[in-house]
């Protein structure tokens, strides 16, 4: 009798509360993802029917003389794109956050201004920077000339050697606000007493930052790194806006997102191929999944140990 | 170790005067307790000595150095925080060695000094733990070790026991006192707990409303409070203070038959202070009252509290004033009983209600 009373009824209400999120998420995220993964194992026949081909699409992607160079090129460019963001964007964000958190005058104004590009439309950003850097009527050349550096000017967006770096730096400029805010929030969350303790312990500002503040914001550093990784391997819009789906010049700015777009929808002389597109998408998914898993199992576990 | 000298030190936060200009000299090796209710300026004073807070005006000397405008790291003082302020991401050992590493000491020196203080505080077995795994007391021991390892000119402690459990606080109290005796280190200790202050201080500086009310040995602030605030604040319960009227060598409690003849040595100073006669505050500690059937004072028992070794009787001496009298725990005084008592002439004190200052007895030759 006692047991009967203690056994709780099935918690129906939990299901009810979970249902809306579960249904919407499944319908618009899980199902399309799984279906596109499924599609990567098929090809479209003459009668528009789906034919199972196993991993043939992946073999094509890695070995075909048309696909393989484009795929490896996009992968390489994407890694460079990511590396530039990690090194430039996140270092600058950390520096800015440290400055803002040190309580300089007008801190909230700087914060808003630095965050402003992030809230602007990518299309606007891309268009503005194309205008600025335009070798015919852009202002960058005359600005450089005004400070006697005119000889340094090059059509950076148009040269294969500099286009990817230029596009990456524009993206850095736009998104630096996000890691900055995350670092800032983490920095101001450090108890004042700890910093005071460091001050009386005789630590210099530099020592306090690297030995106390930085280790304490490592969780935020990890989050910023994984957000950058996911964001960069999903990136598409800025490059599409500025360089089009061909990601010129000569595919110099081609990344996974633009490669997927061309493969799936087709572009100029290339016919759209949904199943090969799905294969590229599956590779993007795999790359991002690997990164996220590494983050969760290697980084986050260590951080949790440290926090204990 | 060094003398700390505050000269006309003042702190304002905007319009708010946190510490009014104060002078204080802390001798080399002295254990001085800054005591007062919250908001009295004691922590601000300590923080000004450490350099965590700048002074608005005044000078702070540490030994013969003027440190008034030096950065905390250049003052060579150690600060112990109420909530330990240990660095959570590194082990106890690394916490303790942090000040030495920040100063670029050699590895051998660091290891040796850390071992020494760890042995002194008996925390050798905890050195590899992170602060989060340690109890509050052990965390504070690590924080003390971090302060000691530097061998600073002075130790500044901001309610270091405030975050600990009551029974553990006493243990740590004794440990800190013992450390002070071993190291003979100039120490400034902030607390709002007067029992802690009495137990630990060589000298107690009682502060209230941004002003030093009295600085003296625990004995002095307890038996010879400089004013009504100190009389009330020190002791648990505080000194009994009864509004009375003085005339011709006799203090009488208005509205009652209670008369108390002022003991020898008091008449002259009282006469001088009151210019003959007038309002006076009669003060005595609960243990100074002696229950006697022929005592000159009487009152009705209002409540009785057994405190363990003794009882504290709350006695109505007139309609407004209740005094506390320490009595034998074995004798039961029912509520409503009328008691007669006397005050030990050595332990009676008088205050001027106008200035609130204590009246000083004539020094007997």
Image: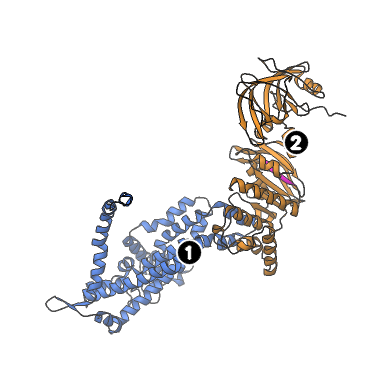
Chain colours: A blue, B orange
* Residue pictured at 78% horizontal, 18% vertical: B249
Q: Which residue is mark 1?
A: A303
* Residue pictured at 63% horizontal, 55% vertical: B141
Q: Is residue B130 left or right of residue B224?
A: left
Q: Residue furthest right?
A: B365
User: Secondary structure beneath disc 1?
Assistant: helix
Which residues lie in the magenta part?
B29-34
Residue B32 magenta: yes
Query: What chain letter is assigned to the residue under label 2?
Result: B
Q: Is residue A106 left or right of residue A44?
A: right
Q: Residue furthest front?
A: A1
Q: Is residue B16 left or right of residue B341?
A: left
Q: In the drawing, what numbered circle is on residue B220?
A: 2
Tell which of B221 and A197 is nearer to you: B221
Residue A301 magenta: no
**Rendering quarter of residue A210:** bottom right
* Residue pictured at 69% horizontal, 15% vertical: B257
Tell which of A204 and A138 is nearer to you: A204
User: Secondary structure beneath disc 2?
Assistant: helix
**Measured from the top left, where is residue B51 in percent x and y?**
65, 50
**Rendering quarter of residue A267:** bottom left
Query: What chain letter is assigned to the residue under label 1?
Result: A
**Measured from the top left, where is residue B343 in percent x and y?**
74, 25
Query: Are discs 2 and 1 both within one chain?
Result: no
Q: Is residue B271 left or right of residue A213?
A: right
Q: Characterize the local packing of mark 2: few (<14), some (14-19) or many (20 or more) Cα atoms within 10 angstroms.
A: some
Q: Characterize the local packing of mark 1: few (<14), some (14-19) or many (20 or more) Cα atoms within 10 angstroms.
A: some
Tell which of B230 and B166 is nearer to you: B166
**Measured from the top left, where is residue B30 in percent x and y?**
75, 47
**Rendering quarter of residue B316:** top right
Between the C-alphas of marks 2 and 1, the distance is 54 Å
């Amino acid at each position: 009798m006692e047991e009967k009373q203690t056994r709780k009824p099935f918690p129906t209400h939990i299901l009810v509360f979970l249902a809306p999120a579960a249904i919407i998420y499944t319908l618009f995220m899980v199902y399309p993802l799984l279906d596109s993964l499924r599609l990567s194992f098929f090809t479209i026949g003459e009668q528009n029917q789906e034919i199972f081909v196993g991993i043939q699409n992946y073999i094509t992607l890695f070995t075909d003389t048309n696909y393989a160079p484009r795929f490896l090129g996009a992968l390489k460019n994407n890694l460079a794109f990511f590396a530039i963001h990690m090194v430039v964007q996140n270092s600058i964000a950390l520096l800015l956050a440290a400055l803002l958190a040190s309580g300089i005058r007008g801190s909230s104004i700087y914060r808003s201004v630095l965050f402003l590009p992030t809230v602007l439309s990518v299309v606007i950003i891309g268009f503005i920077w194309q205008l600025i850097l335009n070798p015919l009527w852009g202002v960058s050349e005359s600005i450089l000339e005004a400070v006697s550096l005119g000889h340094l000017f090059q059509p950076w967006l148009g040269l294969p050697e500099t286009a990817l770096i230029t596009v990456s730096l524009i993206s850095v400029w736009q998104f630096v606000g996000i890691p900055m805010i995350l670092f800032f929030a983490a920095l101001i969350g450090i108890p004042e007493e700890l910093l005071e303790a460091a001050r009386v312990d005789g630590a210099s500002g530099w020592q306090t930052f690297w030995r106390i503040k930085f280790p304490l914001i490592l969780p935020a550093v990890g989050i910023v790194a994984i957000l950058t990784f996911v964001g960069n391997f999903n990136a598409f819009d800025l490059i599409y806006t500025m360089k089009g789906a061909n990601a010129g010049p000569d595919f110099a700015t081609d990344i996974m997102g633009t490669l997927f777009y061309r493969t799936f929808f087709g572009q100029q002389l290339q016919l759209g191929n949904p199943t090969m597109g799905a294969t590229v998408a599956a590779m993007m998914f795999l790359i991002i999944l690997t990164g996220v898993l590494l983050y969760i199992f290697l980084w986050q576990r260590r951080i949790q140990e440290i926090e204990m | 170790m060094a003398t700390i000298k505050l000269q006309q030190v003042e702190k304002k936060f905007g319009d708010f005067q946190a510490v009014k200009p104060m002078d204080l000299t802390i001798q080399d090796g002295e254990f001085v307790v800054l005591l007062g209710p919250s908001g009295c300026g004691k922590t601000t004073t300590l923080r000004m000595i450490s350099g965590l807070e700048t002074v608005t005006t005044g000078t702070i000397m540490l030994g013969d150095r003027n440190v008034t405008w030096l950065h905390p790291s250049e003052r060579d003082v150690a600060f112990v925080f109420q909530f330990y302020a240990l660095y959570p991401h590194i082990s106890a050992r690394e916490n303790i060695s942090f000040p030495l590493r920040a100063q670029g000491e050699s590895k051998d020196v660091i290891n040796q000094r850390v071992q020494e203080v760890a042995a002194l505080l008996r925390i050798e077995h905890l050195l590899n733990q992170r602060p989060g795994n340690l109890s509050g007391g052990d965390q504070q021991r690590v924080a003390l070790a971090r302060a000691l390892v530097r061998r600073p000119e002075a130790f500044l402690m901001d309610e270091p026991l405030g975050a600990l459990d009551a029974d553990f606080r006493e243990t740590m109290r004794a440990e800190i006192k013992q450390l002070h005796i071993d190291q003979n280190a100039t120490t400034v200790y902030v607390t709002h707990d007067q029992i802690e202050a009495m137990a630990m201080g060589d000298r107690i500086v009682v502060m209230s409303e941004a002003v030093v009310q009295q600085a003296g040995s625990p004995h002095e602030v307890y038996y010879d409070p400089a004013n009504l605030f100190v009389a009330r604040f020190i002791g648990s319960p505080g000194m009994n203070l009864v509004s009375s009227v003085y005339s011709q060598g006799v203090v009488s409690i208005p509205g009652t038959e209670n008369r108390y003849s002022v003991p020898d040595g008091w008449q002259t100073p009282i006469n001088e202070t009151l210019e003959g006669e007038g309002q006076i505050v009669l003060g005595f500690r609960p243990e100074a009252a002696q229950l006697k059937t022929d005592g000159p004072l009487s009152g009705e028992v209002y409540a009785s509290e057994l405190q363990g070794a003794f009882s504290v009787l709350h006695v109505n001496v007139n309609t407004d004033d209740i005094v506390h009298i320490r009595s034998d725990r074995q004798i039961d005084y029912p509520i409503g009983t009328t008691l007669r008592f006397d005050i030990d002439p050595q332990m009676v004190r008088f205050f001027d209600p106008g200035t609130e200052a204590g009246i000083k007895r004539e020094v007997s030759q």
